[in-house]
Image: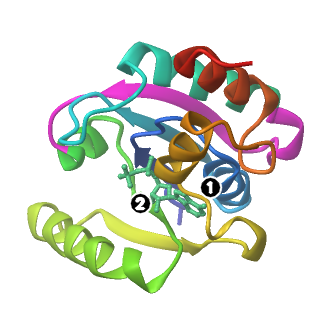
Amino acid sequence: MLSKKKIGLLPGTFDPITKGHTDILIRATKFLDHLIIGVAEDIVKEPLFSSTERFDMTLREVESLKSCMDPLCHVEVKLFSGLLIGFAKTVQATVILRGLRAVSDFEYEFQMAGMNSYLSSEIETTFLMASDRYQFISSRFVKEIARLGGDISHFVSPYIKDALSQKFGSK
Ligand code: ADP
């Protein structure tokens, strides 16, 4: 019997992409044939970076991390708008991947996975637990620390750190 290709979709805002995100996506390449990183255009929360900026930054990060990823997994970054499940079907994803940090992520993620499974029962949602050293990282706090002039080197790559400095007009 031919085995079905495992196509994963990691959706998110990536405002901006952090080491927490990159840890999850590097690990996901180990068990997927194809990984699509979906950068959401329509988001309820007001993003700091435009969708084009978030897409470009994510693409650049992914390119720079190629050597850490499983070479057998094809990785792509795509912008999407509209319903996540609609995009997942368009790219023929077999699994939606999410990272789980603390218990506080659980309720939202649990509800989202339930709603998505109601909208499409063929697409499973799978969770990867955040690694210890990255589990407290969130784009929201990274932006807050950067805005107040704190050091974010442990949380993001030097390129993202510079992009944040430019946004907040500091060195
Ligand atoms: P959203 O805006 O939908 O929360 P994000 O861009 O914040 O999307 O994150 C995309 C995915 O990456 C989510 O599943 C989120 O839980 C996960 N993620 C974010 N930060 C981390 C982290 N530090 N460790 C593990 N997963 C993370």
Q: Which secondary structure, mark 1? A: loop
- Residue, far bottom: 103
- Vertical placement of 150 versus 170: above or below? below
Q: Is residue 167 left or right of residue 47?
A: right
Residue 82 colored magenta? yes
- Asked which quadrant contains residue 63, the reply is top right
Name which residue type carries label 1.
Leu
Q: Residues within 10 Å of mark 1 (few under 14, many from 20)?
A: many
- Res. 5 in view: no
Residue at the (38%, 49%) spot, across then down: 93
Residue interval drawn in magenta: 65-83
Name the residue furthest right.
Answer: 67
Eyeballing the image, is 32 above or below 69? below
Distance from disc 2 to disc 1, alpha carbons, whole Å, reads 9 Å
- The answer, for residue 152, to whether it is visible in the render is yes
Crowding at mark 2 (Cα within 10 Å: few <14, some 14-19, many 20+): many
Q: Which mark is residue 16?
A: none
- Kindly check if marks 2 and 1 are in contact, taking CB atoms under 8 A apart as contact: yes
- 151 left or right of 167? right
Which quadrant does the C terminus fall into?
top right
Coloring basis for residues: rainbow
Where disc 2 sits, the SS reads strand
- Locate residue 68 relative to residue 58 in the image: left or right: right
For label 1, the residue is 32
Viewed as shown, does residue 142 lie left or right of 113? right
